[in-house]
Amino acid sequence: MKIAYFFQTLKILFIFIVLVLFSRTFLIEPGVVNGMSMEKTFIDEDVFLINKIILLLREPKRYDMVQFFDKDSGSLIIKRVVGLPGEQVYIKKNSVFIIDKYGVETKLNEPYLSQNMITRTKDGAVKYNILEPNTYFLLGDNRTESTDSRITGPIHRKYILGTISKFPFTKN
């Protein structure tokens, strides 16, 4: 009887571990912010959730916060999607503009930025190349402290792991 109870407990524990590993690998997992590049949305050491399954169902959308693998540094990084495939990002007058496939230029509305946050490049006004299929232009919310697509270039979809949501119990 005790042996049967022991094996039943082991079976339940095994199923639990498999479910946790499956969930963290394919569905959702926690993460912790390391740095200031997403302030005011996230501050250093805030906890967030990575939704991995949503990007199996749809492509990243403008304004999504995403986690991606930076192949140069080997790090997992979070940024915000601002430019989509087929669009051209144009940074001028301290703001981000999008030029769509018809040549229509639109200034992005970015209410998530701090009130006095401006977007600059080291070269002044810059019109980036049209984004190729499956590539995205990502920017940090703290533009003065963010190493993002302005410097590293666009990010290919295969490196984007999931969308980011704020954990309910963050400091910010």
Image (cartoon, rainbow, N blue to C red):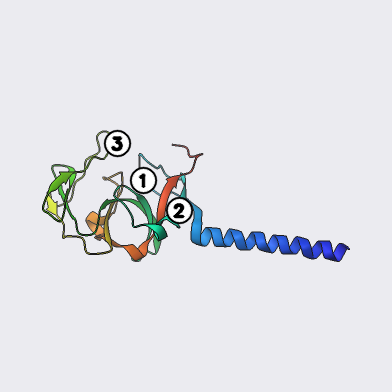
Sooner in the amino-acid sequence: mark 2 or mark 3? 2
Q: Which residue is mark 1?
A: 36
Q: Nearer the viewer, residue 61 or 39?
A: 61
What residue appears at the point 47 percent right and 37 percent down from the top-left corner? 171
Helix, strand, or loop for circle 3?
A: loop
Observer-side mark, 2 or 3, equals 2
Q: Decide: is 158 above or below 101.
A: below
Residue type indicated by callout 3: Ser
Sooner in the amino-acid sequence: mark 2 or mark 1? 1
Q: Quadrant of the C terminus?
A: top left
Residue reaching furthest to the right: 1
Residue 70 in view (yes/no): no
Q: Which residue is mark 2?
A: 51
Observer-side mark, 3 or 1, equals 3
Label tally: 3
Residue type indicated by callout 2: Asn
Helix, strand, or loop for circle 2?
A: strand
Observer-side mark, 2 or 1, equals 2
Q: Quadrant of the N terminus?
A: bottom right
Q: Which residue is mark 3?
A: 114
